[in-house]
Image (spheres, rainbow, N blue to C red):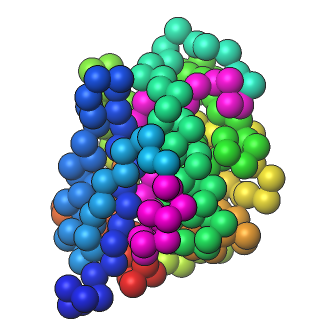
Amino acid sequence: MTAAQSPLIGLTVYSSEDRYQYYPRDYVSAVRLCGGIPVLLPPGESNTEKLIDLLNGIILTGGGDINPVHYGGDLHSQIYWVNDDQDKSEMNIAKIALDQKKPVLATCRGMQVINTLLGGTLHAHLPDNYGNAVLHRLEENLAVDHDVRLKKDSALAKLLGAVEFPVKSWHHQSIKELAKGFQAVGFAEDGVIEAIESDAYPNLIAVQWHPEIANEKNGLQKKLFQNWINKCS
């Protein structure tokens, strides 16, 4: 892929009131490794539609929790890093990108943003609903390994050429009720939804795990990124 062919990939950036505190380094590295050019998208942009016009694809990255007001939930004691500007910005980015049929890769919080935007709901804190038989993050908020199984007829299974594999997760929330038109196509061993798809959005890949963390070491996760970057090209 030549420099002229390298797609411009927008990456959402998590922020606090006084500084940008979440720089998506692993995402940037994964995009570059697969031939893309990363472009950071901090919240608060007033010309979002014009900016997205210039980009070839959007990655909705991980980050803090979505304000439960967006899905009719309660403010659970374990909810953290709620940022209303971030929620507004990412939902706007997601809506414009989906409306424009841009390729979108939504990971962890990103998948939750998509589901919430389109009318779905979230579990506020997984241990309350699924226990701790499968850990989805460590106590010290570090990524943890667990297996995911995909439906064999899903687009993601066909793209990866695999239906069961280990992933790295770092989350305490997940999809509860699916947005209309979506189906769950990937699950952890405890039943937590790990991937969703919709025929209405064939350019969307939405997963609950973090493929960017294992990108250089795990060929399957690199394949996910590479195939998506190729779609952006």
Q: Nearer the viewer, residue 228 or 7?
A: 7
Q: Residue furthest right?
A: 180
Q: Residue furthest top?
A: 77
Q: Residue at x 76, y 43 (%)?
A: 119
Q: Is residue 205 above or below residue 56?
A: above
Whether residue 29 is visible to the viewer of this picture, yes or no, is yes
Q: Residue furthest front?
A: 46
Position in image of residue 217 (x %, y %): 19, 61
Q: Residue at x 38, y 61 (%)?
A: 10
192 vs 73, left or right, is: left
204 vs 52, left or right, is: right
Q: Is residue 217 above or below residue 131?
A: below
Q: Nearer the viewer, residue 143 or 83?
A: 83
Task: State the image quarter where residue 30 is shown.
Answer: bottom left
Task: State the image quarter where residue 146 is shown.
Answer: top left
Q: Nearer the viewer, residue 209 or 68?
A: 68
Q: How many marks?
A: 0
Task: Tell me the quarter of the image containing the C terminus.
Answer: bottom left
Position in image of residue 61 (x %, y %): 40, 48
Q: Is residue 37 above or below residue 135?
A: below
- Report the magenta residues as a range: 47-71
Q: Is residue 32 magenta?
A: no
Task: Tell me the quarter of the image containing the N terminus.
Answer: bottom left
Task: State the image quarter where residue 169 is shown.
Answer: top left
Whether residue 169 is visible to the viewer of this picture, yes or no, is no
Position in image of residue 183 (x %, y %): 72, 58
Q: Nearer the viewer, residue 47 or 196?
A: 47
Q: Residue at x 61, y 71 (%)?
A: 100
Position in image of residue 13 (x %, y %): 35, 44
164 vs 67, left or right, is: left
Q: Is residue 65 magenta?
A: yes
